Amino acid sequence: MIDKERIERIINEHITGTDMFLVSLKVSTANRITVLADTMKGITIDECAELHRFLEKQLDRNIEDFELQVSSPGLDAPFRVIQQYYRNEGNMIELTDMNGEKFTGKLRNVTDGGFELETVIKEKGKSPSVKELSFNYDQIKTAKAVFKVN
C-alpha cells in the first residue's frame, strides 16, 4: 500500500509558497489516492491537473500501481480545514454545533482560534434580531457554505 504520509509530503512540496491548500487526502488499501485541494480564490481545473501531473511524476507505477484523483472539495462539502473558513469569510454558512443546534449566518472575523457568525435570531413574540455568535472550532460538528440561487 502506498504511504499516505509520503503522498502528503509530496503534495506539501508542490503547494508550499502558493495559496493552494490540502483539504483532504485518502489512500485506500487498493491504492486509490483521492486528493481534495483548494485555493483562497477557488481551485481551477488547470491547478488540479498540475497537482495531478506533479504527483504522477513523483510516484512510480512500476513499483506500485495506483489510481489518482485530484479535485476540489465541491461547493456543498463540509469544511475540513481552517483555510476553508478563511476562504468563506463574508459568505453565508450553515453550521451544526456539538450540541446539535443548527445556525445559518454570515461568517465573520475568522482567526486560527475560531470565528463569529452574524445570524438572525427569531424568538417567539419578539422581532427578529441580528446577533454575532462566537464559536471555537472545537465547538463545531459540521460547517459548510450556503449558496442561494435567485
Image: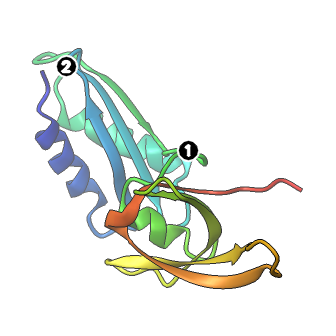
Q: Left or right: where does residue 97 sit relative to residue 130?
A: left
Q: Left or right: where does residue 109 sit relative to residue 125?
A: left
Looking at the image, tell me whether mark 1 or mark 2 is earlier in sequence order. 2
Label 1, on which residue?
74
Q: Left or right: where does residue 61 sit relative to residue 94?
A: left
Q: Which quadrant, please, contains the C terminus?
A: bottom right
- Mark drawn on residue 61: 2
Indicate the amino acid at tag 2: Arg
| SS assignment at label 1 | loop
> Is residue 93 placed above or below 47 in the rendered structure?
below
Indicate the amino acid at tag 1: Gly
Q: Position of residue 133 (x, y in %)?
A: 53, 80
Alpha carbon distance from label 1 to label 2: 28 Å
Q: Position of residue 103 (x, y in %)?
A: 60, 63
> Is residue 34 placed above or below 86 in the rendered structure?
above
- Viewer-nearest residue: 140 or 121: 121
Image depth: mark 1 or mark 2 in front: 1
Q: Position of residue 87 (x, y in %)?
A: 51, 68
* Quarter location, residue 50: top left
x 60%, y 48%: residue: 75
Q: Position of residue 76 (x, y in %)?
A: 60, 46
Numbered disc total: 2
- Viewer-nearest residue: 35 or 52: 35
| SS assignment at label 2 | loop
- Viewer-nearest residue: 137 or 130: 130
x 37%, y 51%: residue: 23
Alpha-carbon neighbours of circle 1 within 10 Å: few (<14), some, or many (≥20)? Answer: few
x 19%, y 19%: residue: 61
